[in-house]
Image (cartoon, rainbow, N blue to C red):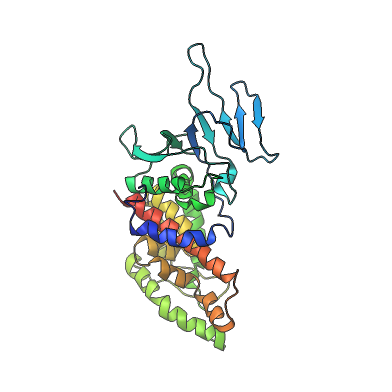
Amino acid sequence: MATGILGRPLKMLNRFILRTLTSSGSRNISGLATAEQPESDGQSSSFTFTSDNGDRTVQNTSSRDDSIYIKGPKKDSSSQLDASSVTMPMSFMTGSIVGKRFYKKVITREADDGIGWTVMLDYRTLKTPAKRPLKCPTRALAKAIAAEWEYQEADGIRPFTMPLMQLACTAFERVPVTRPKIIENLMKKFNQDLVFCRAPGDNDLTAMVLERQVEKVDPLLHWLESEFGFKPAIYSSFFGGKQEDGLVNAIEDFLKKTNDCELAAIDAIAASAHSLVIAIGVFRGRLGIEEAIELIRLEEDSQIDKWGLVEGGHDLDIADLQVQLASAAVFLRLSRSH
């Protein structure tokens, strides 16, 4: 039921995600996820219990520093147990399996202050790394994140199957405090953007790549000029070129006007695509996921056409790229859907 309102965007993501998530670790994202939960029943083998005085009682934990720490409940004369919280370790944002599933039911509800939507694990609020309730701007995004938690297996939580949760942690925790740095890093790479580089036409292989670039990339560059009012420069140098200051300033101003969810999605797409222009194209609806992937892989696919595909190599790279782009695009769309 959690996925009932998501429709086509989440289906698009699900189509790609299972083919690659178990093949390689997900990219590290600077965030942790926390959720309130009652005292464990002792079934999990990766929980470390901590009392109020800081003493730890270890129950079946490994020697690695990736345990889940549960703050011990406060005790007084009138109450034996209060609610406790569970904080996911850093491995929650990598390809590791984090503990066993410690909850049975996942629901969403409107935030207590009426602003946004929260995800509930056994009626306890899912929290951000800063231990604040995870408040999604739309019900659709909350439902999608709830679906990721709902589909976790009983034998372990697999964070690498939860890209929307990871993007939400990034958007709600990292972007607000590092926004200027994120924009600076994006603009630092803008002059070397993938779509500005052209293959030389001095041999058969590169001439074929150049023909495809003219056919596939030029329409995107024409669109970029019409959107921002400046013609982008193209080059063949490996070290890149320099774009006109007017175009650089226009792109930077555009990034500054985005909200936190939008900037997180653009940053994620640009990192996977090696192209801020492609990320903006997806953001503005000029490019679909398949079109973006075709542009990103244009040169490598040209080589595959000539020399063949390496199974277990090229196919996994393609699947991973599909997951990264599709998850960011779905996150962007759901963060706008009311």
Relative to 190, 225 lies left or right: left
> In the rendered view, would you say 10 is above or below 43?
below
**Residue positioned most to the top:** 77
Q: Nearer the viewer, residue 91 or 131?
A: 91
> In the rendered view, would you say 318 is above or below 303?
above
Q: Nearer the viewer, residue 30 or 52?
A: 52
Residue 89 in view of the camera: yes
Picture quadrant where residue 13 is located: bottom left
**Residue positioned most to the right:** 63
Picture quadrant where residue 332 is located: bottom left
Q: Position of residue 238 (x, y in %)?
A: 58, 73
Q: Identify the residue at image location x=50%, y=59%.
A: 18
Q: How many marks?
A: 0
> In the rendered view, would you say 226 is above or below 186?
below
Q: Position of residue 330 (x, y in %)?
A: 39, 56
Residue 187 in view of the camera: no
Q: Position of residue 136 (x, y in %)?
A: 38, 43
Q: Identify the residue at image location x=52%, y=14%.
A: 76
Q: Nearer the viewer, residue 2 or 55?
A: 2
> In the rendered view, would you say 189 is above or below 165?
below
Relative to 166, 281 lies left or right: left
Q: Position of residue 299 (x, y in %)?
A: 53, 76
Picture quadrant where residue 105 is located: top left
Q: Identify the residue at image location x=51%, y=81%.
A: 209
